[in-house]
C-alpha cells in the first residue's frame, strides 16, 4: 500500500509540473502558474467540520483523495490577448469529478480520446463495447480545454480549475 501511495504522489506531482498548453494570438504574452491542492476535512476551533485545501507536498495522498488543479493566467503583453486556450490532461491515475471544471469567461470542453477532439459534455459521445455511440461519462474524460470568450486585457488575469479523485 505504501508503494501505491508513493506512485500516486509522483503521478500527482508530475501532473502539477506538466504545464498546461496555452495558445494566444500574441506569442509569449500569457504567463501560467499551476497549483495542485488536496482537500482535507478537519474540525475548526468551534468543532465544526470544514474542508481546507493544502499543497500536495504537505499531505499524504491516497486513493479517493480529491485533488484540485488550478491554473492562473496573466496577460503580460501590451495588447489584448485573444484566442487564449488552456488545455489540461487528466492523469490516467485520476478520475475527473463531473461538473467541477470552472473558469470565468471561458467555454469549457472535454475530450475522451486523448485530446484529439473536444466538445461540451452534453454533446460528447463515445463508443461502448459493441461499437455503438453513447453519451460519454465524466469519468471517461482525458482532457479539459478552456477557451477564453473575451479578449484578455494587458495585465488581465484569471484562473481555471477542476477536481479529480485519485484512483
Image (spheres, rainbow, N blue to C red):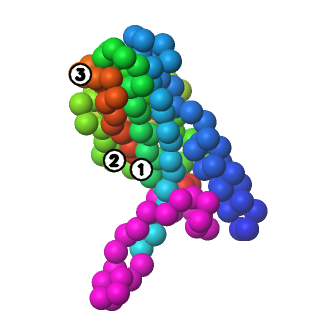
Q: CA distance from mark 2 to mark 1?
A: 6 Å
Q: Left or right of 104: which side holds 79?
A: right
Any magenta on residue 12? no
In primary-sequence order, the first of circles 3 and 2 is 2
Residue 61: x and y in percent read 59, 64
The residue sitting at 30% across, 88% down in the picture is 46
Q: Sequence-wise, which precedes: disc 1 or disc 3?
A: 3
Q: Nearer the viewer, residue 31 or 51?
A: 31
From the top left corner, tell me how far across and down residue 24 is, in percent.
Answer: 41, 16
Query: Which quarter of the rendered picture does the C terminus lie within?
Result: bottom right
Report which residue position mark 2 lands on: 100
Q: Is residue 120 visible?
A: no
Gap between marks 3 and 2 measured at Cα: 22 Å
**At which x and y percent is residue 143?**
47, 32
Residue extent of the magenta highlight: 42-66
Q: Which residue is mark 3?
A: 150
Q: Which residue is mark 1?
A: 163
| Residue sitting at x 31%, y 30% | 156
Amino acid at each position: 500500500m505504501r508503494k501505491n501511495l508513493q506512485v500516486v504522489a509522483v503521478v500527482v506531482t508530475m501532473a502539477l509540473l506538466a504545464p498546461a498548453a496555452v495558445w494566444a494570438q500574441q506569442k509569449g504574452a500569457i504567463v501560467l502558474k499551476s497549483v495542485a491542492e488536496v482537500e482535507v476535512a478537519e474540525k475548526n476551533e468551534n468543532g465544526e467540520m470544514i474542508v481546507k485545501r493544502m499543497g500536495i507536498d504537505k499531505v499524504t495522498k491516497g486513493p479517493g483523495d480529491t485533488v484540485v488543479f488550478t491554473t492562473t493566467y496573466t496577460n503580460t503583453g501590451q495588447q489584448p490577448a485573444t484566442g487564449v486556450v488552456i488545455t489540461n490532461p487528466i492523469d490516467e491515475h485520476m478520475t475527473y469529478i463531473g461538473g467541477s471544471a470552472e473558469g470565468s469567461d471561458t467555454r469549457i470542453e472535454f475530450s475522451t480520446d486523448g485530446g484529439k477532439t473536444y466538445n461540451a459534455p452534453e454533446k460528447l459521445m463515445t463508443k461502448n463495447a459493441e461499437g455503438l455511440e453513447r453519451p460519454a461519462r465524466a469519468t471517461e474524460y482525458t482532457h479539459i480545454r478552456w477557451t477564453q470568450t473575451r479578449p484578455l486585457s494587458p495585465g488581465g488575469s484569471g484562473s481555471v480549475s477542476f477536481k479529480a479523485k485519485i484512483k
